[in-house]
Amino acid sequence: MFRQLITRYRAIYQRVIWGTALERLSWPRRAAVNVVRIIQAIAVELAKGDLTLRAMSLVYTTLLSLVPLLAVSFSVLKAFGVHNQVEPLLLNVLSPLGEQGVEFTRRIIDFVENVEVGVLGSLGLAMLIYTVVSLVQKIESAFNFIWHIDQPRRLARRFSDYMSVILVGPVLVFSALGITAALMGTDLALRLVAVEPIGTLVTIAGAALPYVLVCAAFTFIYVFIPNTRVNISAAFTGGLLAGVLWETSGWLFAAFVASSTQYTAIYSGFAILITFMIWLYLSWLIVLLGAQIAYYQQHPALVNAPHDNEPLSNQERERLSILLMLMIGYNYYYNRGLWTQDRLAQELSVTPRSLQYPLVILERQGFISQTGDAPPGYYPARDIETISLRELLEAVRHAGDPAEEEWSGRTELKQVAAVMRRVDEAIGEALAEQTIKDLVCAQPRPQDHEVGTVTQSDQRSGHGAVMK
């Protein structure tokens, strides 16, 4: 009886949530169904365990890098005279730990103040910076995993981007906070606060300010950290939900810590460290969940897309490689801008990771190249008139094949090799001398008035047009 009831409600759920295309639903129901679909997709990701594993890895890296990170930021902030605001900010981040958060903040600040960057020497300073950069690199790796990006930033860009955030970011944040506090402390501001309803609005704004700052910080890292182009709207959606969830979780975790005094008796002096690690884990898990929400918000067609855990079949690999070569050659031939991996995945309604293997094959075989932009755009490595379909298909079909001498030795293997050669010859005769340019020219020629025409700014940003 109970099993039948579960089966019945599961069928109702599948019919309501997945039984109708979103385009046919009214706007309110479409939004509600889309939210439920995203929640289900995120629940599936959590059940797989990859996000929790990445969160635990970030906890370990944070423990190793926290003091060096604060030491570098503290040294830079000290030069601008705003280093005294580090402790209040750290107290706010660790406020869910209650009294233990105050003690942990004091210990961290003591560690940071005892670190003399000037006496570390060249090797010590290099190790300090490397430890800090490794934290940001680990965060980028986790975000790239969520966005299905296998290629990290280039080494030079990685160092410059990371150091700009580590060194310049704290200065801008603390300077803005200091200027805001100074303005609110002026006589004019105090007189305005005393006037209603300005005073009530300022009180409400003060209560909402932590949420705004956290959501803005999450939105920034969702745009900046992944090695791909992230839409502001998607990053804002993920940042908003993650920020609200983080602040709300802080209240709940503070209540948990306040009501769990027995853990101090059990773990003694380790209780503060264990509590801190649990809060770090929850914080990183929330950050990764926000990144996952931003990913699905930018790729709504992938919410119900099958996961690409299984490798592509031979036919899928060949078909996808020809299609990618056609799309890249089409946009390049008609000066429609360069395709990026993310845009190709969005156009084909597949995950970017499923395109990684055929793109790597095409690049290794010398059919396409990529720009040095972030994210890189793809263009033909040579004239598409010289790229024959026969050559392309042979390169794709035989990518990763063993050397010819490895087939020698047994009569059966030689017979199989002869059969495969006849197959290759038959395919070559069927394709004759047809080239990628022939496929491109067989497509309708783009018109300037068509929707999706790439502007000059789109070309610079690496966006391609939709093929008609």
Image (spheres, rainbow, N blue to C red):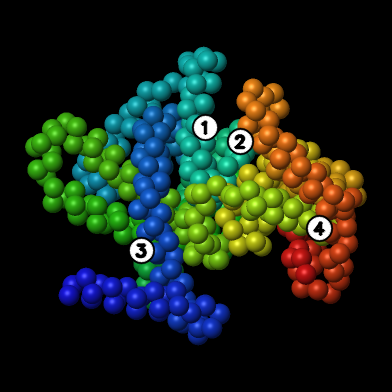
Q: Residues within 10 Å of mark 3 (few under 14, many from 20)?
A: few
Near-viewer residue (164 or 37): 37
Q: Which residue: 22% across, 47% down?
A: 98
Q: CA distance from mark 2 to mark 3?
A: 37 Å
Q: Which residue is mark 3?
A: 207
Q: Nearer the viewer, mark 3 or mark 1?
A: 1
Q: CA distance from mark 3 to mark 1?
A: 34 Å
Q: Is residue 190 visible?
A: no
> Residue 251 occupies which quadrant of the picture?
bottom left
| Image vertical order of residue 233 relative to residue 285, above or below | below
The amino acid type of the residue labelled 4 equals Asn
| Image vertical order of residue 192 relative to residue 98, above or below | below
Q: Which residue is mark 2?
A: 158
- Quarter holding the C terminus? bottom right
Q: Residues within 10 Å of mark 1 (few under 14, many from 20)?
A: many
Which comes before the other along the chain, label 4 or label 2? 2
Q: Nearer the viewer, mark 1 or mark 4?
A: 4
Which comes before the other along the chain, label 4 or label 3? 3
Q: Secondary structure at mark 1?
A: helix
The amino acid type of the residue labelled 3 equals Ala
The amino acid type of the residue labelled 1 equals Val
Q: CA distance from mark 4 to mark 2?
A: 29 Å
Q: Horizontal placement of 308 versus 68: left or right?
A: right
Q: Which residue: 67% across, 57% down?
A: 343
Near-viewer residue (365 or 193): 365
